[in-house]
Image: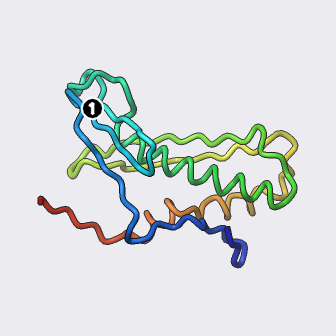
Amino acid sequence: MASEAGVVRDDDVATAADHLDVDYLSGEQYEITVRGHRVRVDQPTGSGGADEAPTPTELFVGALAACVAFYAGRYLTRHGFDRDGLRVRSDFVMATDRPARVATIRIVVHPPAGFPAERTAALAAVASHCTVHNTMQHQPEITVTVG
């Protein structure tokens, strides 16, 4: 992990060789496999699923919140604070018009007890520059093909 002008960056930045696979399981369930790890996704029962796993959209928001937490945690450690008690909460609202998408995401970083109030702006600045948030702010080129 490197720091540049107070911005924390991942050392595990994806390369062109990085990939993940998604395989159909049953009903509305799929399994994501990445580096040997497996994560299932499903849909709520009202949407045809069995509600046995988060939806892909929930994982998307969860990835953002987890990335914010990672950066916040690294900030805390770098400045001598304990991570115990660090919590990140995220709320999101789906758009009511087309195309289907997340319209708003609100993320709140709850630092550990005793974290000094005068450091909250710096913590927020670092946390808001996580890799996932940066990607959302600078949209990647996305190509979908059938092959």
- Nearest the viewer among 21 and 141 is 21
Residue 72, how many percent across, how many down? 69, 54
Residue 36, how many percent across, how many down? 44, 46
Give residue 38's quadrant in the image.
Answer: top left
The furthest residue to the front: 36
Residue with the mark numbered 1: 29
Callout 1 amino acid: Gln
Residue 8, how many percent across, how many down? 66, 67
Give residue 19's quadrant in the image.
Answer: bottom left
SS at mark 1? strand
Residue at position x 32%, y 38% in the image:
31
The quadrant the N terminus occupies is bottom right
19 to 92, vertically: above or below: below
Residue at position x 25%, y 42% in the image:
23
Q: Residues within 10 Å of mark 1 (few under 14, many from 20)?
A: some
The quadrant the C terminus occupies is bottom left
Residue 21 appears left or right of 122: left
Residue at position x 60%, y 53% in the image:
68
